[in-house]
Amino acid sequence: MGKNKFKRLSGIRRLPRGKFGSSLKRSNAAPFLALLGIILALLAVAALVIYVLLPAVMPYFGREYYPPLVPTPTPEPTPRPTPTPHPMESFEPFEGATEVVIDGTDYRWFADPYFYDGTIVFSGGYLVDGDVRLNTLFMYDALDGTYEQFDYTPAYDHLFYPQLNEDWLVLLDAGAAGGGQIVAFDRHSSSNTPIIVKDVYVGQPEIKLDGNYLVWTERTGTRMDKLFVCDLTTLETTTLAMFQNSVFGQSIPSSMNGLIVWAVSDTALEDEDSNAVISYIRINGGSMQSFAPGTYVHDPEGNGAYFCWLDSHHAQGAKLYAAKGPTDPFLVAEDVTEFALFNDYVVYGVGETVWLHSFTTGEKYQLTPDDKAAQFIGVSNGMAFWMNVSARGRDIIEYLALP
């Protein structure tokens, strides 16, 4: 009996392996789980495209792409180049002026400084029988203050308006009562022989050097003045304009950057109450041109970009005008005693103070302090000059390199 019992127990059947999984497939949840798997697979593919593939590919097509739910990065501002400040903004004129110093006590009177390539040329002199004689030419190193006297014995009393460039040194060897001769020196010649450009019989014409050309207006008769241009390489002299009984014959021409500028009347009546025409011509060709600024014009200057002029013969209350090209004249300053145009600015004196007007910034800059009495005397090749007249008894030339 017990034996049979054990037989029945050993006869219990086991479910075959996998039987439970097969039943699950046959259950009601199988379709749902299959659909869920497909959905998850599709979402995974979509996420791969959206978050990986598109961000990597779109920049190649010139498009920016940011996946959804991902914070868009704050765009960095486009870097802007730092604007270059105008040189005048950091300019310290009161600290940059330097005095011309000539040793000894003989030379106490100086005139007409002109700067080129590190050298200042000017005339110097001393008292002769109680009268000043500016009969010596100095070549002064603007960097170290050394100097030498130029080897030239004047034929007359004074050496006026010395100027130099790479090729030439020119000056007016003038008589005390007027007259003299315009002299040039070839700086490439070892002989240092003076070249007489022209004899002058009346007055002391102010010469202007520009390259190989010399320009000046000279009184040639009782009521006649002529505007001359001389090619120093050939000494050929041409009369560019004539002034018959005209106040404009007293106006100094300018020659800068190959442009000659002078003033003539705009009417038959030529006096200081009339308006004027500014005439100009290129040295190396081109026709004569002119424009009427609507004011009287005296000592006009032009450099090809700007024109400047006074509205009177340096009289009290004289106004300084300027124009960019031959258009739209405007008032720069009043009570101007003297001025000089260079590059994109004009330097001028008002009373005993020197000022600079920048055409680029439209601003005015004071070049000499209020406690210094300064008489403006010129600008050449970026160097401004004035006489320090705070003390009397001798001439003190000061110079300042402009930015």
Image (cartoon, helix red, strand yellow):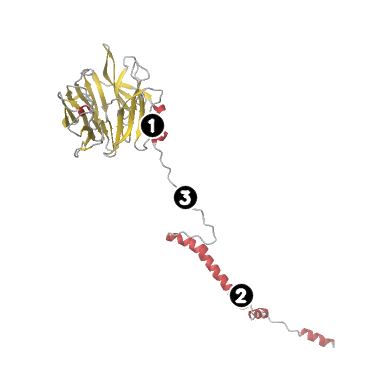
Question: Label 3 sits on what residue type?
Answer: Pro
Q: How many marks?
A: 3
| Residue placed furthest toward the left | 221
Quadrant position of residue 127 = top left
Give SS at disc 2.
helix
Q: Secondary structure at mark 3?
A: loop
Among the two numbered marks 1 and 3 on one chain, the one whose residue lies closer to the N terminus: 3
Q: Spatial distance from mark 1 to mark 3, Cα to Cα? A: 36 Å
Q: Classify residue 312 as left or right of residue 54.
A: left
* Rendering coords of residue 350 (x, y %): 34, 27
Residue 401 in sight from this viewpoint:
no
- How crowded pointer 3 is (Cα within 10 Å; few <14, some 14-19, many 20+) is rated as few
> Where residue 185 sits: x, y (%)?
22, 26
Q: Earlier in the sequence, mark 2 or mark 3?
A: 2
Q: Amino acid at mark 2?
A: Leu
* Helix, strand or loop under label 1: strand
Mark 1 Cα within 10 Å, few/some/many (few <14, many 20+)? some
Residue 77 disc label: 3
Residue at the location (75% across, 84% down)?
Answer: 12
Q: Are marks 1 and 3 in contact (CB under 8 Å)?
A: no
The residue positioned 35% from the left and 33% from the top of the image is 357
Which residue is at the far top? Answer: 129
Q: Is the residue 44 above or below the residue 280 in the image?
A: below
- Residue underneath mark 2: 33
Q: Where does label 1 land, which residue?
A: 365
**x and y percentages locating residue 198 in the rendered image:** 17, 25
Given residues 254 and 27, the one toward you in this image is 254
Please tell me which residue lies in front, 38 or 205: 205
